[in-house]
Amino acid sequence: MLKPFMFFLLTLIALFPLSVRLPAQAKEDAASAYAKCAHCRKEGFVSARAKNGAGKLMPLCYECASLPRCSFCQMPADVDSGGGDRLCRECAADTIKENAEAEKVMKDVRQVLSTKFKMTSKHKITYGLGSRRDLNLEADGEHNELGWFDPKIIRNKPQYTIRILTGLPRDVFRSVGAHELAHDWMDETLPHLMDKPEIREGFAEFVAWLFSEAEGNKRMMEYTESRTDEVYGGGFRKVRAMMGDAKTAAEWKSILLKEFPLKGKKSGN
């Protein structure tokens, strides 16, 4: 009779810590399922979690989780960007909507590229903003363009224009600006590559990715890395593999010329 009793007693002792932990775990689970919604700020049960512009998972209630999402993060969108997009309140808090501000930011991006990567051009560039419809019309109409580099010859004089979608969050705008300035650099330095879409766009994405890395802009780095289309996404991965650890314009030029020599010249010259 003593042995069964001892066995029962030892079993109770072994299970006691578990019985203490279970309520604590249940309390923790309940807390994670009940929180203040990051959008409407009401407290209630969490229906979903969405990444904000900084990549942080934010709790959403059932009603807010069913709302349309921001064009540049996963949060509910209730603000018109002015350029054809819907933004969350966080992304809409700091956007570029004036040509004067766009020009100021673009000049700063150009300076960062020059200082950080020695990527410069002598072109005098006119900067401006446009709606998504305007940018798509200027391009091929098949992509949701965020920016557009437009080199033209007018009355025998070259003119260079960069237009970027109005209402972009500042960090997105700066990354797009780096992409378009990479086109400008290639147009001046390696113009024979401008008619190779995969290399042209892949290189611009590569420069924008490095620029975003230098600025600690994980959102735009992840955006570039996640692209799956052949020209932008495939081009980026191809160029990044080609470049290896090269991080200056002189190194990029050397590698690109080796891979795609000028007509009539041998590779490596």
Image (cartoon, rainbow, N blue to C red):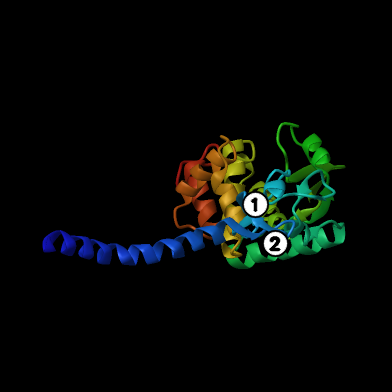
How would you rate the neighbour count of disc 2 (Cα within 10 Å): few for under 14, some for 14-19, many for 20 or more?
some
Q: Is residue 105 left or right of residue 7?
A: right
Please name whichever residue, 213 or 91, is drawn nearer the observer in this view of the structure.
91
How would you rate the neighbour count of disc 1 (Cα within 10 Å): few for under 14, some for 14-19, many for 20 or more?
many
> Which quadrant does the N terminus fall into?
bottom left
Q: Position of residue 228 (x, y in %)?
A: 55, 38
**What residue does disc 2 label?**
110
- Does dot 1 land on a helix, a strand or a loop? helix
Identify which residue is drawn at 21% across, 65% down: 10
Please name whichever residue, 229 or 181, is drawn nearer the observer in this view of the structure.
229
Q: Position of residue 250 (x, y in %)?
A: 54, 58
Q: Which amino acid does the dot numbered 2 rest on?
A: Arg
For the residues labelled 1 and 2, the Cα–Cα distance comes to 10 Å
**What residue does disc 1 label?**
182
Please name whichever residue, 66 or 269, is drawn nearer the observer in this view of the structure.
66
Identify which residue is drawn at 56% across, 61% down: 31
